[in-house]
Image (cartoon, rainbow, N blue to C red):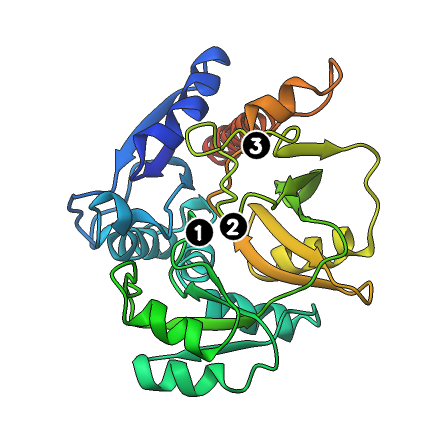
Amino acid sequence: MSQIHILFENREWTAPLLAELDRRQLPHRNWDLTQGQFDFSAPPPNGVYYSRMSASAHSRGHRFAPEFADALIQWLEVHGRRVINGSRAVRLELSKVAQCAALQAAGIATPRTCPTHGRDPAISAARSFAGPFISKHNRGGKGLGVHLHDNVDALTAWLDGPDYEPPIDGILLLQEYIQAPEPFITRLEFVGGEFLYAVRVDTRDGFQLCPAEACAVDPAQGPMFQIVDDFSSPLIEAYGRFLRHNHIQIAGIEFIIDGAGRALTYDINTNTNYNPEAENRLAPGARRGLASVAAYLGRGLTALDNAGDLASVG
């Protein structure tokens, strides 16, 4: 019998999805990618595969889990298995440079970004920014390496100080700081390539914007995450085309509005989490993240089983 195979490295983030699959009595197998092996010449088990690989795996001691996930997913794809958030999604998840390139190729505006490798080149690139700028790790997640710097001297002090943590792939991005009229960013969630909802995220407490219950903070000035009622924007259609073109089925994409009213897209999260506190404020019957993901996986499994039945008859 076919199953839903969940590829993961972080049990804490995956547990709520597994509970939803159990609730719906959908057969599933959990595939831990923190270590493992497979035979490239042998066919993988039947089923629908969903990758939950995260760019921040190394921060949990799983340095090479993303590389192993990429290898395993290539095995699945060459054997024709259905993979949700497959090899293209993994590669975008692991590189903000790749994200920036893909967004610009799609005609989606992004903040000015300078990839750097090495201390002196980073300082040199910083001199090209007229005002404050942000540093971030190319392979990020959980706000890794994200700091606001007022000027070159501030960056230099940070690079030479005890709090500096080098990026795991050696690439540090310097990015223009967007002076938003209001302190928030917006994240659009997509499941099955379709728009689910928009989340307004308060940024007054900094750049740690992970929506998972385990890493959300509780700011004193109201909820950090708020789902926006009746959200409308041309970005919904643009992001939908972008995801289809890049073969990504489940993702959260973040943008910020600058003082001139421009929407600048700066992050694609293909290992998206959903904030339960924000969803608890939704009206009864409204679509929710994990429920939508589980339903989408279930539909994929049904379609696969039906196709197999037809093949056996024909």
User: Which residue is painted at 56% across and 23% down in the image?
Assistant: 276
Q: Quadrant of residue 287?
A: top right
| Disc 3 target residue | 219
Q: Is residue 37 visible?
A: yes
Neighbour tally class for label 1: few under 14, some 14-19, many 20 plus, Cα within 10 Å: some
Residue placed under numbered mark 2 in the picture? 207
Say above or below: 262 vs 240: below
The spot of residue 135 in percent (x, y) is 45, 67
Instruction: Give the secondary structure at mark 3.
Output: loop
In the image, residue 13 above or below residue 283: below
Q: CA distance from mark 3 to mark 2?
A: 13 Å
Quarter location, residue 122: bottom left
Q: Nearer the viewer, mark 3 or mark 2?
A: 3
Q: As shown in the figure, which amino acid type bears the numbered disc 3?
A: Pro
Q: Are marks 3 and 2 in contact (CB under 8 Å)?
A: no
Residue type pointed to by label 1: Gly
- What element does badge 2 sit on? loop
- Circles 2, 1 touching at the beta carbon (< 8 Å): yes
Query: Would residue 4 be visible to someone looking at this image?
Result: no
Secondary-structure class at tag 1: loop
Compare residues 261 and 275 and report the one nearer the observer: 261
Front in this rendered view, residue 44 or 148: 148
Residue at 55 percent across and 32 percent down: it is 274
- On residue 143, which mark appears? 1
62 or 90, nearer to the observer: 62
